[in-house]
Image (cartoon, rainbow, N blue to C red):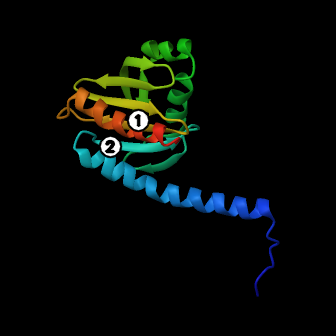
Amino acid sequence: TYAYEEKSESNVNTTASRARQKLLMSSWQAYVDQQLIATGQVTAAGIYDLQGNPWAYSAGFPAQIAEVKAIGDAMLQEDTLQALAGTGIVIAGEKYMFVKGELENVVLGKKGPSGCGVYKCNTCLLVATHNDKIASGAFNTAVGKLQDFLKEAGI
């Protein structure tokens, strides 16, 4: 037995919107795998909404919702962004020294020769790390390219 559902215009639009969102959500993993990890310039990465909820992430990347949300929130105001200089950045339980922050754009951190970055797009955050074998500049370029692409696409 099938339940009858009235097809109002708003219901059709909502259904179409959900279908588009589901399609986009399933393709986020490809962005992580092909546009970040496959470059060889990123060790681990994830795409999160602005509240810190994961959309996709590389295998074994344990960035926590609260960690991502805290950094995303800090990026919204100059005083909270600069406060990261005193507290550092925590991603996946690892504490990084704050190196650089640009309001509503990027936060970068270092831990010895390794590093991390949180890159803000319109509707999501790219969170990534690199190991000691990857130069910070190459890492920043790789993640920055995806950030630019997503921003231009309105995402």
Q: Is residue 78 above or below residue 129?
A: above
Q: Secondary structure at mark 2?
A: strand
Q: Are marks 2 and 1 in contact (CB under 8 Å)?
A: no
- The residue that appears at 82% across and 72% down in the rendered structure is 6
**Given the image, on which type of amino acid does mark 1 rest?**
Asp
Residue under the image location 24 percent in, 35 percent down: 131
Q: Residues within 10 Å of mark 2 (few under 14, many from 20)?
A: many
Q: Which mark is residue 22?
A: none
Q: Residue furthest left?
A: 133
Residue 108 visible from this viewpoint: yes
Task: Report how many numbered discs are placed on residues in the image.
Answer: 2
- Identified by mark 2, the residue type is Ala
Left or right: 10, with 49 as reference point: right
Looking at the picture, tell me which residue is in the foreground, 57 or 24.
24
Q: Is residue 17 left or right of residue 59?
A: right
In which quarter of the view is residue 85 placed? top left
* Number of other residues with Cα within 10 Å of mark 1, as a class: few under 14, some 14 to 19, many 20 or more: some
- Please, is residue 116 above or below residue 18 in the view? above
Q: Position of residue 95 (x, y in %)?
A: 38, 26
Q: Residue at x 59, y 38 (%)?
A: 51
The kind of secondary structure element at disc 1 is helix
Q: Position of residue 134 (x, y in %)?
A: 20, 34
Question: Viewer-proximal residue, 125 or 58?
Answer: 125
Circle 2 is placed at which residue position? 44
Side of 54 relative to 45 (left or right): right
Where's residue 137, x and y in %? 24, 27
Residue 145: x and y in percent read 34, 37
13 or 143: which is nearer to us? 13
Residue placed under numbered mark 1 in the picture? 148
